[in-house]
Amino acid sequence: MRLLALLCGLALLCTQAQAQVRSFDDMLDSGVLKVAVYENFPPYSFLQGGKAQGVDVDLAQNLAKGQGLQLELLWVTPGEKLDDDLRNVIWKGHYMRPGVMADLMLRVPYDREFSNRRNDVGELANEQVVMFGPYQRERWQVVHDSRRLPQLDTIGLFQYHKVGVEVDSVPSFYLTSVLGGRLSGMTEHYANTREAFEAMRGAKVDAVMALRGELDWLQHETVDPQLHNADNTYPNLGQPAWDIGMAVHESNRQLAHAVDQQLDEMIRGGAMEKLYARYGLRYELPGLYQDVE
């Protein structure tokens, strides 16, 4: 009897989890589109003076308006893996906020190999999620202070000049291991990209490696002509650039199609590039559009 009760309870929980996923008609009837964005992630999604701002926040506003809906933001704390975020936001929910899930999630890496990845028993690892709508290409970038490092055409110079990175980030792992670890002694770690950037401004390091979008935003805020974007390559860095897209529950393909059409119009019409320019960011077309161009 105890086992039967447990199984019934688990079935009920699964039913409740599934019931949280709203259909496209339910969204239209409610007048609200629930969009998940990452918290405290400037220039993409952050609070400033109590107001939600950022590229992804503005994009979410545009998408909701295009569907004739009001926007409701769901702020997400990133988990250890993207799989965790997709589970907590799109198809199952988080135990800390039961019943709360998003209709649409932004800033999801758009990668067919990742989307089709299978688990240990051969099933799709994220079979309940549809990843679609690439809207930006992101890449790693180095910014250097030309007063102390006039030119940066090779990362080999970081044997002699300190570089700041965010702790536990790809740049951290990369710079401490590439070239046989010869750069590790000059790689300084900080809690986030802004702290690394401020360390460069304070002459504690001569360069910073981070997401291009983050560094564009910080340079836009700072307006210092002595801070330059490096054009060097990154040997042995597995993925120097990747596309950013969106995700919905697999039952919400109708929403995905509607949003995809809006995105296509924004990208081809130049509205997406203007949106990024508001925050001082360079906009790079995702691969899908580069291939067409």
Image (cartoon, grey):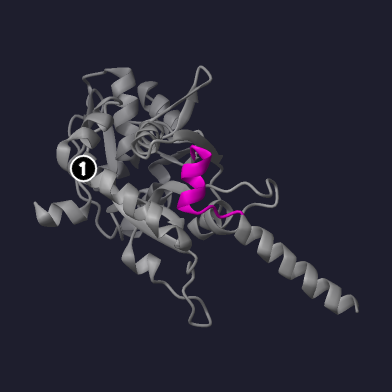
Residue at position x 35%, y 48% in the image: 183
Residue 62 horizontal side relative to residue 252, left or right: left
Q: Is mark 1 on a helix, strand or loop?
A: helix
Camera-nearest residue between 73 and 53: 73
Query: Dot 1, crowdedness within 10 Å: few (<14), some or many (≥20)?
Result: few
Q: Can residue 108 be seen in this view?
A: yes
- Residue, disc 1: 265
Q: In which quarter of the image is the N terminus?
A: bottom right
Q: Residue 125: x, y in percent?
A: 49, 70
Residue at x 53%, y 20% (from the top left corner): 50
Going 44% across and 33% down the picture, which residue do you hit?
A: 45
Residue range highlighted in magenta? 20-32
Find residue 47 and report its horizontal and vertical position in percent.
Answer: 50, 25
Locate residue 154, reporting x and y percent: 20, 46
Please, is residue 116 above or below residue 259 in the view?
Answer: below
Judged left or right of residue 293, residue 146 is right
The residue that appears at 47% across and 35% down in the rendered structure is 192
Question: Residue 80's image quarter?
Answer: bottom right
In the current view of this chain or complex, which residue is farthest to the bottom? 121
Q: Going by the image, does 248 lie left or right of 146? A: right
Residue 285 lies within the magenta run: no
* Count of marks placed on residues: 1
Residue 273: quarter of image = top left
User: Does 113 appear above or below 52?
Assistant: below
Q: What is the three-letter code of the residue carrying label 1?
A: Glu
Could you tell me residue 235's position as x and y percent?
Answer: 24, 57
User: Hey, which residue is sitting farthest right in the picture?
Assistant: 1
Residue situated in front as seen by the camera: 289 or 190: 289
- Return the residue nearer the eye: 248 or 40: 248
Residue 113 placement, left or right of 228: right
Residue 35 can be seen in this image = no
